[in-house]
Image (tube, grey):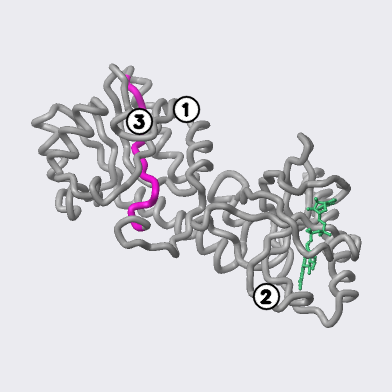
Amino acid sequence: MKKFDSIQSYNSNTSSVVTIGTFDGVHIGHRKIIDNLTEQAAATGLNSVILTFFPHPRMVLQKDVSIKLLNTIKERTDILSETGLDHLIVHPFTKDFSRLTAIEFVRDVLVNQLKTKKIIIGYDHRFGRNRTADINDLIEFGKTFDFEVEQISAEALNDVAISSTKIRNALHNDGDVAKANSYLGYEYTIEGTVIVGKGLGRTIQFPTANIAVKESYKLIPKDGVYLVSATLNSEKVYGMTNIGQNPTVSDEDTKKIETYFFDFDADLYGKEIELHFLKRLRNEVKFESVAALKEQLTKDKLQSLDLIKAYHNA
Ligand SMILES: Cc1cc2nc3c(=O)[nH]c(=O)nc-3n(C[C@H](O)[C@H](O)[C@H](O)COP(=O)(O)O)c2cc1C
Ligand SMILES: Nc1ncnc2c1ncn2[C@@H]1O[C@H](COP(=O)(O)OP(=O)(O)O)[C@@H](O)[C@H]1O
């Protein structure tokens, strides 16, 4: 897959089959649409192209800073690169871009820049300044500019929308990472840099790598304790992650993401770690003492090791 950082930088002499969308999560519903796109492109000798925007239009137009997404733009790009897609365009969404009229968008972007022969698009897609144009306008433009329009049905689109929302809710409301993973078709991940914490962990024989996530828009699962895996120094290791405020030892209300890795002993400070979320174990609890916390951590570890054994025997 070739990636382009803007519509203007797109350059190919081959015509294309195009779809437009956010594809947050690139879950199993999205992948059906993308398979359809790549199969049609391959059958007709055209390029398969996805046009996506970053930042998310809502971040730009409504200045919505509370929006949480399943994928960082890097994750989205990486997952899409495995789908067999020919070209991905990640166009910076701006106010100026949102002011393009429907005809400007169709003529300048779809026809002249992307050489679109076919567009696969949701039946309810609206585009152009103030979202004034709809699918019927697009079909009319297609007659003038010689491209085909394939509508994604209400049912298919509903499936896609529902599963994005379902995945966000499963993670945000319930911390149900197993459910999220089954919709995503892969394990939900969080990537961050290991930062220095309070240094308490090692004093109770549970050193924890605290990570800082750069992207404020990345959805962090509900507070609680999770079984995770990661690749550290090129080896797969398992661990248990706590997301929360460590109420037993802290009054601060800053959210921490910290992981104790099993059978592991090395300095991780400054390293980039990608946590794969496998299963939710329990809620975060305020214990009466650090000793009680330590006792629970020992139980969590035993439960985790049993789960890992079960995964390996499955
Ligand atoms: C698997 C796991 C579960 C945890 N569960 C809780 C919890 O339920 N309540 C709590 O107050 N802290 C919990 N903690 C956080 C500990 O309080 C924290 O690891 C310890 O204070 C060390 O912090 P430090 O890394 O800043 O030194 C948990 C940590 C881990 C790794
Ligand atoms: N098994 C392990 N799991 C997590 N971190 C470990 C482990 N072994 C060593 N470490 C190192 O110890 C650090 C955590 O120790 P800790 O006492 O909890 O300090 P801090 O409060 O700075 O996180 C990690 O950032 C990592 O560099």
Asked if the stretch drawn in magenta spans residue 57, the answer is yes
Which image quadrant: the C terminus?
Answer: top right
The residues tagged by marks 1 and 3 sit, at their Cα atoms, a distance apart of 11 Å
Front in this rendered view, residue 262 or 42: 262
- Residue at left 89%, top 71%? 295
> Residue at 21% of width from left, 48% of height from top?
127
Q: Three-letter amino acid code at disc 3? A: Val
Q: Which residue is mark 2?
A: 252
Range of residues picked out in magenta: 46-58
Q: Which mark is residue 84?
A: 1
Q: Residues within 10 Å of mark 2 (few under 14, many from 20)?
A: few
Residue at far bottom of view: 288
Q: Secondary structure at mark 2?
A: loop
Where is mark 3, residue-wise?
49
The answer to which quarter of the image holds residue 41 is: top left
Q: Residues within 10 Å of mark 3 (few under 14, many from 20)?
A: many
Q: What amino acid is at disc 1? A: Gly
In percent of the image, x 71 and y 46: which residue is there? 270
Depicted 312 relative to depicted 132: above or below = above
Identify residue type, mark 2. Glu
